[in-house]
Image: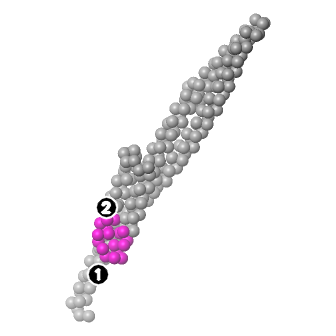
Amino acid sequence: MGAHESMEHAEHAEHASGSNKKIALLISLLALFLAFSETLGKGAQTESISKNVEASNLWAFFQAKSVRRTVVQATAEHARLSMGTVGDEAAKAALAKQIDDWNKTAQRYRNEPETGEGSEQLAARAKEAEHKRDLALARYHHYEVASAAFQIGIVLASATIITGMIVLSWVAGVLGLAGLAFTAIGLFAPHAVHLM
């Protein structure tokens, strides 16, 4: 090998080395963004599971309150209907007071703003938990798409080093931008694009 050929080989190696450094930087950036999207995705997934459990618990509590209210109302109605069979005025007065207490209890089971545990308040809290669950789930789906774009981009950028096909690094860059877009959508407007 002559001196001229040796210099050409060195220049080619230097150019390839510079190109490989750029590809390595692209892979590093894609991996960084992948870490962010995966972390955000796990957080959103955990939030959606947590809010789903919360909503389920609140709906179960709502059902229990509704059953109690129905039983108390039925008991009060039965007692009201049987009041005509009671002959003693003192017993009638006591039964009327008990019916009134049962009706107040039934109303408290329906609406209890002080504790937030009336069936109306429980339903509102359960719906809010469902809304937060749906929001977190929408975010999660966007982060998953972003992660897939980053992962495919990393594979294509790595293939560029092996094959020397620069077009693969351009496709990897485009996938990285798509991943950033889906991460941003997940963060700021999770209902803007419906995936699932």
Point 56% across, 32% down: residue? 122
| Front-lying residue, 86 or 63 | 86
Q: Single out the residue that lies furthest toward the bottom.
A: 1
Lateral position of residue 9 relative to residue 104, left or right: left
Q: Position of residue 30 (x, y in %)?
A: 38, 63
Answer above or below: position of 83 versus 105: above
Does the magenta segment cover residue 71?
no
| Numbered mark located on residue 13 in the image | 1
Corner quadrant of residue 35: bottom left
| Numbered mark located on residue 79 in the image | none
- Identify the element where label 2 is drawn: helix
Q: Position of residue 126 (x, y in %)?
A: 54, 36
The prevailing secondary structure element of the residues shown in magenta is helix
Point 37% across, 53% down: residue? 182
Does the rendering let one see residue 5? yes
Q: Which residues are magenta?
A: 156-174
| Front-lying residue, 160 or 68 | 68
Give, as a three-letter code, the residue at label 2: Val
Point 76% across, 10% down: residue? 85
Nearer the observer, disc 1 or disc 2? Answer: 2
Q: Position of residue 159 (x, y in %)?
A: 36, 72
Proximity of marks 1 and 2: CB atoms separated by less than 8 Å = no
Does the magenta segment cover residue 158?
yes
Q: Position of residue 141 (x, y in %)?
A: 44, 52
- Identify the element where label 1 is drawn: helix
Answer above or below: position of 177 versus 75: below
Point 30% across, 74% down: residue? 165
Neighbours of disc 2 within 10 Å: few (<14), some (14-19), many (20+): some
Does the rendering let one see residue 116? no
Residue at label 2? 174
Neighbours of disc 1 within 10 Å: few (<14), some (14-19), many (20+): few
Give, as a three-letter code, the residue at label 1: Ala
